[in-house]
Image (tube, helix red, strand yellow):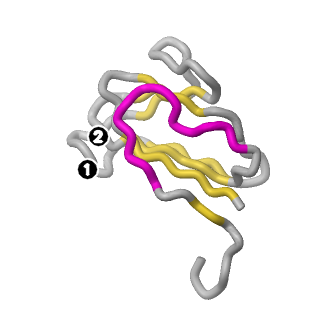
Amino acid sequence: MIGGTSSQNSNTPSILNAAGTALAANNARIAWGIQNVGTNPIFVRFGAGASTTVFHKVLKGGTGNSDGLGSSIDYDGATIYNGIVTVDGTSPLFVVYEIAP
């Protein structure tokens, strides 16, 4: 926050390279996001058990690892999903963050 203070705490963004849990459930979550920093698509599910056939969002990969061209999703505002978030895909590589008070 520029020019002020904030009572919000954020985790250190994590770069993950395996299918499974991207974010554990957190009832205090007020924002979160994932960006694909790999070259393969990743499949994101708002719940347990993401797969290439059971997912809510597909995040397109970039042309090279960590080139900033991969798709991302960010959620903040009045209604935030606070359950577990899982991912799947071939060699997934992504960065994830969440903000909670």
Q: Nearer the viewer, residue 89 or 22?
A: 22
Say which amino acid is labelled 2: Gly
Q: What segment is highlighted magenta in the picture?
A: 13-26
Graded by Cα atoms within 10 Å as few (under 14), some (14 to 19) or many (20 or more), the crowding at tag 1 reads few
SS of the residue at dot 2? Answer: loop
Compared across the picture, whether 16 is left or right of 65 comes to right
From this viewpoint, which residue is outermost toward the top? 53
Q: Nearer the viewer, residue 68 or 21?
A: 21
Residue annotated with mark 2: 62
Of labels 2 and 1, earlier in sequence is: 2
Quarter holding the C terminus is bottom right
From the top left corner, tell me how far across and down residue 57 is, in percent.
53, 29
Compared across the picture, whether 73 is left or right of 40 comes to right
Query: Is residue 15 highlighted in magenta?
Result: yes
From the top left corner, tell me how far across and down residue 18 is, in percent.
38, 30
From the top left corner, tell me how far across and down residue 86 is, in percent.
54, 29
Residue at image location 55% in from the left, 21% down from the top: 55
Say which amino acid is labelled 1: Asp
User: Are discs 2 and 1 less than 8 Å apart at CB?
Assistant: yes
SS of the residue at dot 1? Answer: loop
Compared across the picture, whether 60 is left or right of 44 comes to left
Query: Is residue 40 highlighted in magenta?
Result: no
Residue 67: mark in rendering: 1
